Amino acid sequence: MTSSGRVWAHVGQPFQEQEFDVVVVGAGRMGAALSLYLRVTAPHLSVLMVEEGGLPNEEGATILAPGVWTTLGLPTEHTQAARWTREQLQHHLGDVQFQERPLLELAASPLPDGQASADLAAEFPALNTLVDLNALPHARVDRQAATYRPGSVALNAAQQAIKLGANLLLNTRARLTPSGLTLERLTVTNTHQIVTHEVRSVTARSVVVAAGAAGPHLTEHGLGVHTRHGRAYQQYPRLNLPSTPDTPVIRVQGLTLRPQAEAFTLIPAIHHRDPHGYAPAGGHLTGVPTGLRREVLEDLVNLMDAVPALSSEQLQVGRSLSDLPGAWVALPHGQPGAPSPWPPQWEELRPGHFLLLGGPLADTLGLAVANDLAQTLARS
Ligand code: ADP
């Protein structure tokens, strides 16, 4: 039987180890899942996960990700990966609050394989209160869709990986060097500043950067390898109208209303690739400052006729950025508006250095892509 791996949670625990077969930078859902699948498929490879924050990091994309699994609008080449991911979520990752919940897409013009939205109103009464079915007469349904908690996926996958022998170094920022990594073990001073307590270096046969939106920058900086990946700041405003476990997920023109905690989380469409150095800023609604970005506000205002629920006072637009949950998400390859929007992916940047990106479709495809990289590393 394999013995559990080690966890270094704080700088009081001495870290001396110097060599691993695989070091995974970032223990969001992508890095945690990769580590788990590595331990399952290649138990002969030693694994160290390095995470800058906690598990999952409060600031990462994983903890705020909507957790909506759906194949609606997904190019068919991804169907198999989506099914595999769903199977994992439903049966193999412990309690991730997996719940089957239909997803309804509504539109003003006909949709492929669509039907009349009015025909769904009896089955899904929420439609009558949230949207104007006359403005959105067309619909299609994914009855296989499901919702779950991505934060629990990261936590459970990391815990399972550790049980199977993976090691985890928390509160540690990794930097890449051509020959390995330097690790800055972080601590908090009594004036609440985060400072580097000590610097260690490790070598690894393979380094996988699974650092979310920070990944491309980390590799460009550390290895000098230029990538074409982007990132965007995604905000998740809340709509405090009642939802129940039977309420479907509703999607209108790229805006998703995800029933959550007896209300709704809104997942706006991503239009912009935010350049490095860009600091997200709030907008204004009728002259009043909001935490919601201007472009997101414009989208919501344009949808208010079709989705009258959005003009309700229950829409939380905040007064400043910090009022709204938001996170940086990676946009793997491609520009916004590409026909197949940013599926998760991995790539080998140079021998032994890999980049693993989740991004907006990680809810549906992420685990399969992490597993695919694990299989590749197992063979190498
Ligand atoms: P994903 O969905 O791709 O897993 P996340 O943003 O949730 O994306 O996860 C990326 C994780 O990587 C975060 O938990 C973040 O704290 C961590 N991370 C980012 N940069 C570094 C770094 N330099 N060293 C260690 N961990 C990092």
Image (cartoon, rainbow, N blue to C red):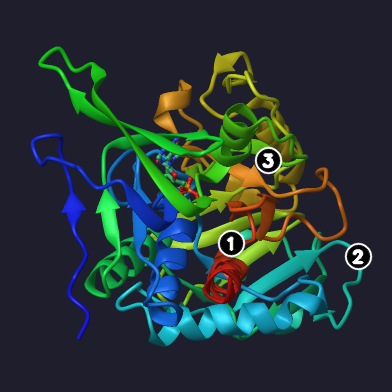
The amino acid at mark 3 is Leu
- CA gap between label 1 and label 3 equals 24 Å
Q: Identify the secondary structure beneath mark 1.
A: helix
- CA gap between label 2 and label 3 equals 19 Å
Between 241 and 190, the one nearer to me in the picture = 190
Question: Nearer the N terminus, badge 2 or badge 3?
Answer: 2
Name the residue at 40% across, 61% down. 32
User: For residue 322, what is the image quadrant?
Assistant: top left
Question: Nearer the N terminus, badge 1 or badge 2?
Answer: 2
Please tell me whether residue 13 is drawn above or below residue 287 in the rendered image: below
Q: Identify the secondary structure beneath mark 3.
A: helix
The amino acid at mark 1 is Ala
Please tell me whether residue 179 is drawn above or below residue 111 in the rendered image: above
Between 91 and 311, the one nearer to me in the picture = 91
Residue where numbered disc 2 is placed: 109
Q: Is mark 1 within 8 Å of ligand 1?
A: yes
- Tell me residue 40's x, y (percent): 40, 80
Q: Which quadrant does the N terminus fall into? A: bottom left
User: For residue 85, what is the image quadrant?
Assistant: bottom right
Question: Nearer the N terminus, badge 1 or badge 3?
Answer: 3
Relative to 353, 32 lies left or right: left
Q: Which quadrant does the C terminus fall into? A: bottom right
- CA gap between label 1 and label 2 equals 28 Å
The crowding category of the residue bearing disc 3, from other C-alpha atoms within 10 Å (few below 14, some 14 to 19, many at least 20), is some
Relative to 154, 300 lies left or right: right
The crowding category of the residue bearing disc 2, from other C-alpha atoms within 10 Å (few below 14, some 14 to 19, many at least 20), is few
Residue where numbered disc 1 is placed: 362
Residue where numbered disc 3 is placed: 300
The crowding category of the residue bearing disc 1, from other C-alpha atoms within 10 Å (few below 14, some 14 to 19, many at least 20), is many
Relative to 186, 333 lies left or right: right
